[in-house]
Image (cartoon, helix red, strand yellow):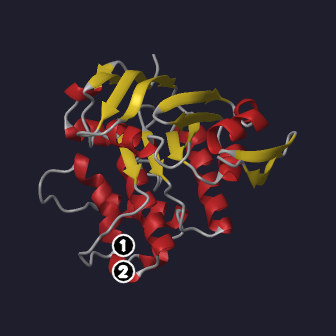
Amino acid sequence: MSLLSVEKVSFSYKKALPALKNISFTVETGEHIALIGPNGSGKTTLFNLLAGFTQTPMGKITLTGSDFRKLSPPERAKSIALVPQRSAINFPYTCLEAVLMGLHPYQRHMQPESEEALQTAQAIMEQTDVWHLAAHRVTEISGGELQRVLLARALLQVLPTGWAGTAPPLTGQRLLLLDEAFSSLDIATRIKMMKLLNTLRTGYGLTIIGIHHDMAMAFRFTQRILALSNGLLVADGTPDAVCSEDFFARVFSVHAEILPGKGFLFVDTIAP
């Protein structure tokens, strides 16, 4: 059984053209997928549906066979976490407090954090290089630092055990959605975070779908590409299979030079 199944999903905002048109695909446990496409192609709309922020008026989404619409918010939050491209946290939480919010689906109201939870949060913040910011206010850190704090929170949400060595890691039914989540990171940090995600994918069975505008990162670090254009799914395959001169010309209106086994170079735009 697939981890996630999207079947003939269409979506329209009020009095607007369809944002998604008859989208279908399945996702297996442990895949790392790049979701790509031009601006306005429907990528964020699809993510909002998968995260449960928007209900699906047409089509069906299932998580390990369960109808997505019948899952309660806590059930959904234990399996799926989203790292947004932009997040305005205006209240001056410390970075540690912000990361610990990832445990909310597992806690009773006003339940204090256990020593194990604090150890787990520290371990994941060390992995994402933000432990040194634990006592800093989220309102006082850089955009790239905030993105890593939000990544740590999301990882704690879907993998709340195993980091501190006190419990086995949870495996399966864990989906991380990244909406251009590394856009503010420098190149070295972006590579390090992508390597971390693939370590979690192979070690914990974490499944990752990331919206990417950095095609080089998508090509190097993901195993599969889903491409949207004008609300349609126009490509689904390995990076080598999808990234062709014809694909870049048709979907992104650019001339590309393909470098076999290495990637590609964008040469010029194609006049409308």
Which amino acid is tagged 2?
A: Ala
In the image, what residue occupies the spot 36% across and 36% down? 50
Report x, y in % for residue 30.
55, 33
Element carrying mark 2: loop
Extreme right residue here? 260
Mark 1 touching mark 2, by CB under 8 A? yes
Q: Where is residue 258 in the image (x, y as percent from the top left)?
A: 84, 42
Q: In which quarter of the image is residue 224?
A: top right
Can residue 107 be spotted in the picture? yes
Q: Is residue 168 left or right of residue 106?
A: right
User: Which residue occupies 78% across, 37% down?
Assistant: 245
Question: Could you classify mark 2 by the number of other residues whose Cα lies within 10 Å: few (under 14), some (14-19), or many (20 or more)?
Answer: few
- Residue at 26 percent of width and 79 percent of height: 92
Q: Which of 181 and 45 is in front in this view?
A: 45
Q: How far apart are marks 1 and 2 (CA)?
A: 6 Å
Dot 1 or dot 2, earlier in sequence = 1
Image quadrant containing the N terminus: top left
Q: Mark 2 points at which residue?
A: 135
In the rendered view, would you say 233 is above or below 48?
A: above
- Indicate left or right for 150 with 89 as reference: right
Circle 1 Cα neighbour tier, 10 Å, few/some/many (<14 / 14–19 / ≥20): many
Left or right: 39 in relation to 193: left
| Numbered label tally | 2
Tag shown at residue 95: 1
